[in-house]
Amino acid sequence: MTSASLDLILASTLISQGAEAKVYKAKLSSDPSDSEILLKHRFRKGYRHPTLDGSLTRARVAGEARALLKCLRAGVNVPGVRMVDAAEGVLGIEWIHGQSVRKLLPGGAGEDEDASGDSEPEAADALREYDIPVDALMQLIGQEIAKMHLADVIHGDLTTSNMMLRHPSSFKSRHPTLSTELVLIDFGLSFHSSLVEDKAVDLYVLERAFSSTHPDSEPLFASVLRAYEQRMGKDWAAIGRRLEDVRMRGRKRSMVG
Amino acid sequence: MPFPNRASSSLNSIIHPTDLPAPMPGRLRQTPLKNPDRPYLAIGLEGSANKFGAGVIKHLEDGSTSVLSNVRHTYITPPGEGFQPRDTALHHREWALKVINECLDKANVSMHDVDCICFTKGPGMGAPLQSVALIARTLSLLFNKPLIGVNHCVGHIEMGRDVTGAQNPVVLYVSGGNTQVIAYSRQCYRIFGETLDIAVGNCLDRFARVIDLSNDPAPGYNIEQEAKKGKRLLPLPYATKGMDVSFSGILTAVEAYTFDKRFRKDGQPKDANDQDIITPADLCFSLQETIYAMLVEITERAMAHIGSKEILIVGGVGCNERLQEMMRIMAEEREGKVFAMDERFCIDNGIMIAQAGLLSFRMGFETPLAKSTTTQRFRTDEVHVSWRA
């Protein structure tokens, strides 16, 4: 038995494989003017009991689509949803033309083992292509996360790899001065919560991601937080206090026994 | 220094900086551990939970190791009961000398021959840890041998690496007290994911108590046998959070099924019409399938994250054949390899403490008497792994 979703996957190109899913670049129709989409296929896990695997996959695909829709409705920049096949574990979303923020900041380009040491000038060059100063980029990050948290969506895996800048040539910016746009991607670990704790941990995860991938990035993250604070308004006080607590204890508990 | 350390002069020459090659660029770094100039012997004493173990290990000049003896005695409580710290400590005190003597006899060495005495510093239950540390201290003073305090988890990892020959694996450490996914990076065993509440073995042990399974040889073993008879997969919470897992809610949920009106404690239908039933075997089966799937999932995430192809399973729950099988299927899908061990090395033992202790002793580490305390909280990532590149 084949399904329409699986046929679509067969006709598309594999981009990468993570632990959870395979990612493909596909087209919904053969019309050349039709734009490409990204397919995320949560393939079957042989080690899991089929019943358990089926219900997990359905719940996760539906959950990710739901989080994206919630963000879209709240005006957060995320990829648009193009198709959902929860039973087969396939989620089709808008293809974003652009570059991950990780590659655009110093230190992040050295992701591949064989990358040479001169990544920093490359990163600066790349950023120029998007015509955005670093500080403005940090502000965009802070604003997008704040918008998402105001909609009570917790990303669960905020890193600079999970943010992209749209290439200026790929769309028409509505912003008066910026020709690019920041998009949050990969909502595979996201969930719905209005708790201060969850939002603080979300920020803490990003802070750790900044310091481990981008050396000397403290001022960068500080400016992310400033923009976040501004956008959150009165909600910031409680989250800021909790963030201090989370920093003190870490995300992990102390180990017993 | 409380000990005239007769090994120190030779050790210094082993790790003298001028002997070391120039640091190599990239990831190919030389191991800082040099082959010993003579055979080294270490005795390890372990008693962080309900097992008291002693073992003698030998490191040879060619860099190989050989296990001379590995003796263990387990404190087994009646069905429905766990082990209390006080009684467990008593058990260790009662059995220590018998086990240590048997271990020396089997190895055919005397206490005078060993180079160092290794003991578990933590983590574990306070009272049992203390009684074993006391025995180690006494032996150290009697025979004038240096003491090495060892992190229990690092002991498991080092023994696993030695027995299986895994080079740089992602380590899944699953036992009654710990659940962690670990990977080595820059002289530290970094914890990628772990349990947010109770350990996986604790969850199994406590469920075995609920359905009155025997604690002999181990509650987890009896759950595994029972699960083979189970047919029905009941829905349980599936609690992975990123790279972390949580088991306490699952334990509550599986316990709740024993109050369900379909539950039959003896596993038998009441009559021919009694078809829709839940048996203890079904619960064991559902529990195993769910929690092991969670463990395999977070291990796979860690593998994808660091790009490793090897998995090493250590700790008492690591003997479980269903967990090993699931891990093997996952590894095959990723073209990786699983390294697992049997109960001799998976379950807490003295030899792993000797192995990790001797490695750090050869790097010049020792624990002075005044610092030979124990601690219930001792994270795996607090240890400086000086013997690896």
Image (cartoon, grey):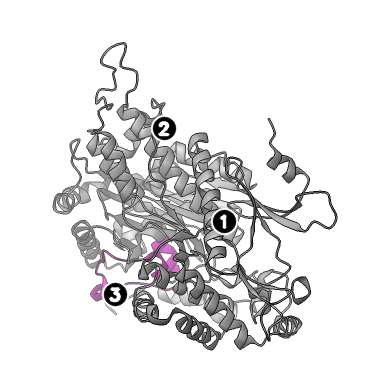
How many neighbours does mark 3 have within 10 angstroms: few (below 14), some (14-19), or many (20 or more)?
some
Reply yes or no: does residue A137 show up in magenta. Answer: no
- The x and y percentages for residue A233 are 42, 82
Q: Amino acid at mark 1?
A: Met
What secondary structure is found at the residue carrying circle 2?
loop
Q: Residue furthest right?
A: A32
Q: Amino acid at mark 3?
A: Pro
Q: Which residue matches tag 1?
A: B303
Q: Amino acid at mark 2?
A: Leu
Mark found first going from the N terminus, 3 or 2 = 2
User: What subunit carries mark 1?
Assistant: B
Q: Which residue matches tag 3?
A: B368
Quarter of the N terminus of chain B within the rendering: bottom left
What secondary structure is found at the residue carrying circle 1?
helix
* Residue B285 vs residue B274, the one in the foreground: B274
Query: Does the residue at mark 3 contact the one at mark 2 (Cβ under 8 Å)?
Result: no
- B55 in relation to B116, above or below: above
Q: Which residue matches tag 2?
A: B233
Mark found first going from the N terminus, 3 or 1 = 1
CA separation, marks 3 and 2?
A: 53 Å
- A112 in relation to B92, above or below: below
Which residues are drawn in magenta?
B356-382
